[in-house]
Image (cartoon, rainbow, N blue to C red):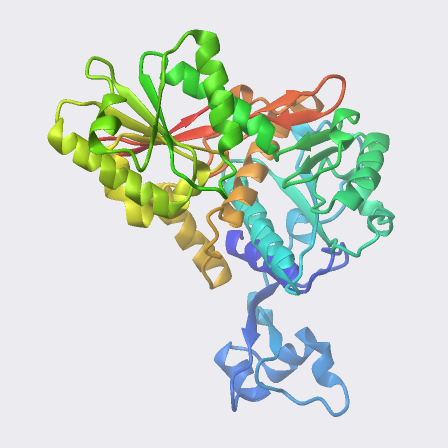
Amino acid sequence: MKHLLRYFLLFSVLMFLVIPAWSQQVFKDLHEVQRKETIFGIARANGLTVQELLDANPEMNQPGYELKQGDTIKIPFPKSKQPTITPSTQQSVPTGNVDMRHREIRIGVMLPLHSQNGDGKRMVEYYRGVLMACDSLRANGISTDIQAWNVAEDTDIRQTLNDPSAANRDIIIGPLYDTQVKALGDFAKSHDIRVLIPFSTKTTEVYDNGCLFQAYQNGNVLNDAYVFRFSQLFKDYHPIIIDCNDSTSTKGTFTSSLRSKLEQLGIVYSITNLRSSEGMFQKCFSTTQRNVVVLNTSRSAELNVAFAKLSGLKMNNPNLQISMFGYPEWLQYTRNHLDNFYKFDTYVPSTYYMNPLATRTEHFKQQYRSNFHQDMQPYPQRFAATGFDHACFFVKGLHLYGKNFLGSSKVVGYTPVQTPLNFERIGNGGMQNRAIMLVHYTRDQRIETMNY
């Protein structure tokens, strides 16, 4: 049944349509037609009669139809092996006003689910992660009822919200675009539905609408959080800020805030330059305290020079204790800099991270590949993992606490694959994610994540 539901939901994504309540036929797979294949050959290869294949693909019955290379056709189960349809696979609309803690959690997804551009492709991958989460939750006794709408950038979301099925969702994930937030937020407020806005948005609706949960954190919020954690974690260290002569850097805001915080706490720090002589560079390091180095750029080229300079310093002063505090962009450089990350006890702040060396990561990648017959897109943030984490977190929270769930990580007990969440209320409005993590590359060559 697990694989059955997976393929049914995958079909709905690929067709970019709302999952309809009338869809009673469940399909075993989708097949891309290859050169010289015939309807008879495809039917025989899948244990079907030609009529069964035609019934599953009504367009084949149209006059003049020709099977062409590259066409995608639906492969049904043979009639002798038709699965039993359950309410969850039918996606039927539940009735009654049963507390969600005692029934399936009803999920709506309103995102651009298409292949026309990067937004659509990323959101299809995100949605696939949501589907994988539903499978995982079901295995742990938590039922879900999921319905999806293709809400592209030019979609009038008010038309989507006219679908009667939208009004009975417990949570709606979306939208992606700023112009659609207010309409969805007003709709959610009038129907007491929770809305998770999963990615960046410049709207301020979350400040006034208690139904909204905003996962994205802007740069100023993150800078403040990173500075605070730095001051807590390295309060007994000697900080050294290295000017890397990068006129394009955007990290001046962080280093300025960090210096203000250190001065406020009475912590003495040093400033040096990447071009300083070895003697002047060495004078900035403490021989009695542990040192923590911060660059004022996130670029790989300057990081490479900094590691070379620090390695020379350590060679001449083997007793110096040096750690590094970096930037989220550094996670993209792991392949080139991993040995130095370990060597200099590096901490990288971020809002997401999927440890490539972890067994759980490999299992997730294999599961995605098995489900969808392709690998995840090679973005630093794996969107399927984000969708998986978002869905697991919220569905579990709603299952445990119903409408009283406010998004605190402490009450959910979920360890993310990649993307931590922890929401706090903004004034009298909605909830803003405040979760960050530090990815720590230890000297004994381990990678640990510290979630806050």
Task: Specify whether 146 is left or right of 290.
Answer: right
- In depth, the one of 34 and 24 nearer the eye is 34
> Which residue is drawn at the image coordinates 50% and 36% (left, top)?
419
Percent across and percent down for residue 268 are: 36, 12
| Location of residue 75 by image quarter | bottom right
> Which residue is drawn at the image coordinates 30% and 38% (left, top)?
306
Task: Specify whether 231 is left or right of 412.
Answer: left
| Location of residue 69 by image quarter | bottom right
Residue 357 appears in view: no
Outermost residue on the top side: it is 266
| Location of residue 61 by image quarter | bottom right
Is residue 121 shown above or below 239? below
- In depth, the one of 215 and 57 nearer the eye is 215
Is residue 305 shown above or below 153? above
> Which residue is drawn at the image coordinates 50% and 45% (left, top)?
385
Task: Specify whether 35 is left or right of 156.
Answer: left
Residue 287 appears in view: yes
> Which residue is drawn at the image coordinates 33% and 45% (left, top)?
334
Is residue 388 shown above or below 316? below
The number of numbered discs placed on residues in the rendered structure image is 0
- In depth, the one of 398 and 297 nearer the eye is 297
Percent across and percent down for residue 137 are: 53, 39
Percent across and percent down for residue 175 are: 72, 44
Is residue 163 shown above or below 27? above
Percent across and percent down for residue 401 are: 64, 22
